Amino acid sequence: QQQVKQSPQSLIVQKGGISIINCAYENTAFDYFPWYQQFPGKGPALLIAIRPDVSEKKEGRFTISFNKSAKQFSLHIMDSQPGDSATYFCAAALNSGNTPLVFGKGTRLSVIA
Amino acid sequence: GAVVSQHPSRVICKSGTSVKIECRSLDFQATTMFWYRQFPKQSLMLMATSNEGSKATYEQGVEKDKFLINHASLTLSTLTVTSAHPEDSSFYICSAKQQDPGGANVLTFGAGSRLTVL
């Protein structure tokens, strides 16, 4: 049973464009939704995270949009750059992240010049 | 920011030998660490939750006698792959939990350890 569904599996975006990655979750008790960025051969790095009490959070070029009623959240990367090319994982957890993260399957983003 | 150091980053061993991977939280104390396994181009699969001073909690299907976890201090957890076989070849990643100023538990990941069993 996959508790967090992520799409698309891969994404190609032109430099300067907007990258959008979507995730849907099933467990309404989840209350912590982070996004991780992973480069090949490296561990994931926390990019941005949101709690369900807000609908949007922005940090620099990265924005999380959260729709509690639809049980969906998405990552938007504005002005995408080749250096953003990586695999992105959404995740969810219970109890403010006190339980292990449940990860989506990941999205391979390629930003081309 | 929080740093988690994982060592070794790469290890090659012969089939039947044991390999130990260390995970250290460098600038914070972590009562809980998690160990993940990642196959190429796939997501992270939680193997076990490591709790300082107590036994690790293993996920279903993970052999606790195969993957020994020791969390002897607040800054160190180790994963030992015993009697390794080629199918154990994988990317192993640890993470340590700490609270952010808002009270949420944030996970910081190590850089991972690539294990190749010949």
Image: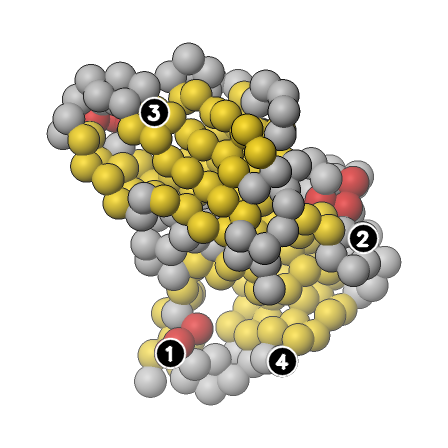
Q: Is residue B18 left or right of residue B44?
A: left
Q: Could you tell me the amino acid type at mark 2? A: Gly
Q: Work out how far the residue at label 4 is from the one at label 3, CA to CA, in angstroms.
A: 41 Å
Instruction: In this rendered view, identify the residue nearer to me: A48 or B32.
Output: B32
Q: Residues within 10 Å of mark 3 (few under 14, many from 20)?
A: many
Depth check, mark 4 against mark 3: the one in front is: 3
Label 3 lies in what chain? B
Q: Residue at x 55, y 29 (%)?
A: B72
Label 1 lies in what chain? A
- The residue wearing badge 3 is B81
| First in sequence: mark 2 vs mark 3 | 3
Label 4 lies in what chain? A
Residue B22: name its quadrant.
Answer: top left
Q: Could you tell me the amino acid type at mark 3? A: Val
Instruction: In this rendered view, identify the residue nearer to me: A103 or A4.
Output: A103
- The residue wearing badge 1 is A82
- The residue wearing badge 4 is A60
Q: Is residue B114 left or right of residue A45?
A: left
Q: Could you tell me the amino acid type at mark 1? A: Pro
Residue B103 shows which numbered tag?
2
